Amino acid sequence: MKKAEHTAWILAVILLFQPFAVLAAESGAHPVQEQTEAPPDEKAKARDREDHADPESDSNKRRFFRDFWQDEKRLWSSPFRASSKDLLVWGGLLALTGVLIHNDEAIYRDIKEFQAEHEWADKATPFLSDMAQGYPFALAGAIWVTGALTRNDHAKETGYLALQAMLHSFVVVQVVKHLTGRARPSAFGGEDRWAGPAGFFKRYEEGKWSHYDAMFSGHTITLWSLATVLAHQYRKSVVVPVLAYSLATLGGLATITDDLHWISDVVVGAAIGYAISRFVIRRRSKNFQIAPVIHRDGVGIGVRILF
């Protein structure tokens, strides 16, 4: 497949199956208080009760999977609610992705040359690249358990949001990996190849399990999903946001020196991981509140976001 052809192909896949750059402008994203004069219809009431039920009324397990399913539906239907601002952001990400894909091989060679000339980069690669191998989920789970044991609601919420965001990211990245079938840099000696949807089957051929799942980086989307939640939940700290995003960035870059991903895989993974986490935060954080509003002219729904 020629370079121009597979660049167009991957952009089409991203456009169709990654609506998440749009999510930053979901209806709950704006720090304003809104009121509607007319009461919502019965369907809207039902959706509101379903989406924002009291978490104490259900078991933690039921709440977790209920929230996950509701947000999955919301994620995949988000393109149908895109505004002009969303499309502008989305178009910028697509353009950047196209440029990076076109230059991936050259950038990969430059990074490998840098790695060969700097021993520290080579030694740090295994540690940084392996950070996403289960550790983010373990950390999020540990934060939640710590919060539960110490009755720290903020810690419980942090672990909960992180687990939700990373699970959504896992679903997204697996769908895209199977659809694009992009070969890892290590598969063909630094040559960029694409199998398209046929890569779904190539992945399961003997000895080729990890050959065709480069686009996009699962390591990076996981690390950025976790980092975004931590940075938000502990935004009053100077250290936590800087440390979280720094480690997520280094972990993503290490997948290039470890011959697992191209630079475009890393950039797209970071952007999507960030967007998904912001979506989950806006949907599920206690800072986002919906409540009935009663005033002299009627009743309505009030939306409040606390920063």
Image (cartoon, rainbow, N blue to C red):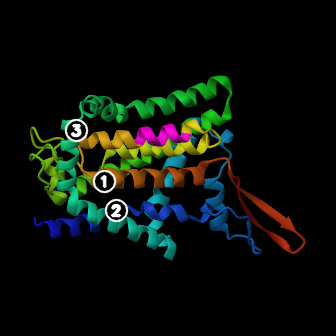
Earlier in the chain: of badge 1 and badge 3, it is 3
Which quarter of the figure has residue 154?
top right
Q: Give the range drawn in magenta.
A: 241-248
Q: In which quarter of the image is residue 218?
A: top left
Name the disc covering residue 265, or none. none
Residue 163 visible in the current orientation:
no
What residue lies at 44% left-to-right and 62% top-to-bottom?
21
Find disc 1 in the rendering and name its residue. Answer: 175
Graded by Cα atoms within 10 Å as few (under 14), some (14 to 19) or many (20 or more), the crowding at tag 2 reads some
Q: Where is residue 195 in the image (x, y as percent from the top left)?
A: 14, 57
Marks 2 and 3: in contact by CB < 8 Å?
A: no
Say which element carries label 1.
helix
Callout 3: SS: helix
Which of the numbered marks, if any, corresponds to residue 17?
A: 2
Q: Magenta segment: does it hold 238?
A: no
98 lies left or right of 289: left
**Residue drawn at x 27%, y 65% as measured from the top left:** 99
Q: Which of marks 1 and 2 is nearer the N terminus?
A: 2
| Alpha-carbon span between mark 1 and mark 2 | 8 Å
Q: How crowded is mark 3: few (under 14 residues within 10 Å), some or many (20 or more)?
A: some
Amino acid, disc 3? Gln
Q: Do the residues labelled 1 and 2 touch (CB within 8 Å)?
A: yes
Corner quadrant of residue 57: top right
Q: Which mark, by number, is residue 115? A: 3
Q: Report if residue 187 is visible in the image.
A: yes
Q: In this view, does 51 lie to the left or right of 221?
A: right
Q: Distance from label 3 to label 2 (Cα)?
A: 34 Å
Q: Main secondary structure of the magenta part?
A: helix
